[in-house]
Amino acid sequence: MATLLAIKYSAGQLEILDQLQLPESCIYIPINNVQDAWAAIREMKVRGAPAIAIVGCLSLAVELRKLTDVESKKDLNQMIKDKLDYLVSSRPTAVNMQLAAEACVKLSSELLENDSVDAAAARDAILKHLEAMLENDIADNLAIGEYGAKDMVEKTGKSKLRVMTHCNTGSLATAGYGTALGVIRSLHKANQLDHVYCTETRPYNQGSRLTAFELVYEKMPATLICDNMAAAAMKQFKIDAIIVGADRVAANGDTANKIGTYQLAVLAKSHNVLFYVAAPFSSIDFEIPSGDSIPIEERPHSEMTHTGSIRTAAAGINCWNPGFDVTPSQLITGGIVTEKGVFRADQLEHD
């Protein structure tokens, strides 16, 4: 069975799977420009740090494909900088979009200074750079899956594992395959997965709407639990490992991920369960020394007070709805799984 695709792109045509419609409907919507991408990211029609960066960059590729008459490299460079700055503002916690933007602006600036490259050639070089992101992300995810599965089996000493995960980190959050869910997918492919337990991930329910959808789609042995059942499930089902994704990893290994991750790490330590973070190197922000400096997005109160259009909380109650929390590096006992291998927090090094 083919893996679900959150992003479809070919020669300037970009579509995304509208994740607000899942699990009821699989509907792809067009992204025709940077403004469309900003809105889709902000409204969480696409989400997951890798997917956010890819959709953002490919939306710029769509515009560059339409730009047949490039007047000057200076104008091109300014256009690219302005549009990428705008995209970075869509969701501030996930670092992938910011790092992808910085890399693209750096390339554009280098081309601007290179007198042997004309404006049309500069546009083509930037376009090639942006369009390579989709394929590169899938290759990184496959490597993360293999490294993580191998390490998990070795450290637990078990041939069949019971694993817990949080939020959605599969093919719906990336270009394909997934990060944390990619590791689980690799265990399943190798017949080393006994069972996976996914949290509902309140208040936006990415676990129950999206992760559960992927697990059913790929026929993995899986059970959905409420967020407040995690400790009981660890004890009842003898969980071997927990693996989550990351929206940003600080230089010291502190990790920002979907709200509820921190409490899982604390519970994992109490139950002697290995705790892993799976993330590509593009999610590691070496400019931020620790998790204290990671900006945390606050989401609308309506996500807590309403289910769809129906109010489920008392009118007038104040709400606190951070989209993410930060897990201290010392609680990441299994390691940080990347496309280059599995590392302890103190082993992370900038290339």
Image (spheres, helix red, strand yellow):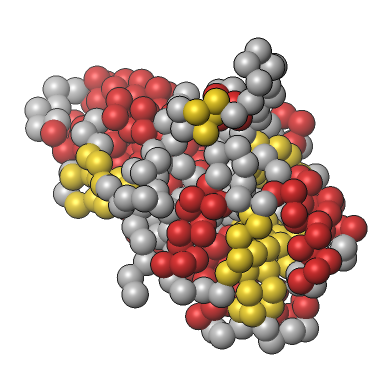
Above or below, comparing residue 186 to residue 119 in the picture: below
Q: Quadrant of residue 70?
A: top left
Above or below, comparing residue 203 to residue 172 in the picture: above
Q: Quadrant of the N terminus?
A: bottom left
Residue at point 24% right, 30% down? 33
User: Number of labelled discs?
Assistant: 0
Residue at point 59% right, 29% down? 312
Residue at point 87% right, 63% down? 271
Q: Position of residue 81 (x, y in %)?
A: 37, 24
Q: Tell me if I can see residue 274 in this picture.
A: no
Above or below, comparing residue 342 to residue 205 in the picture: below
Q: Quadrant of residue 230?
A: bottom right
Q: Is residue 97 left or right of residue 108?
A: right
Furthest toward the top, the residue is: 316
Residue at point 54% right, 52% down? 208
Q: Tell me if I can see residue 348 in this picture.
A: yes
Q: Position of residue 13 (x, y in %)?
A: 18, 45
Furthest toward the right, the residue is: 270
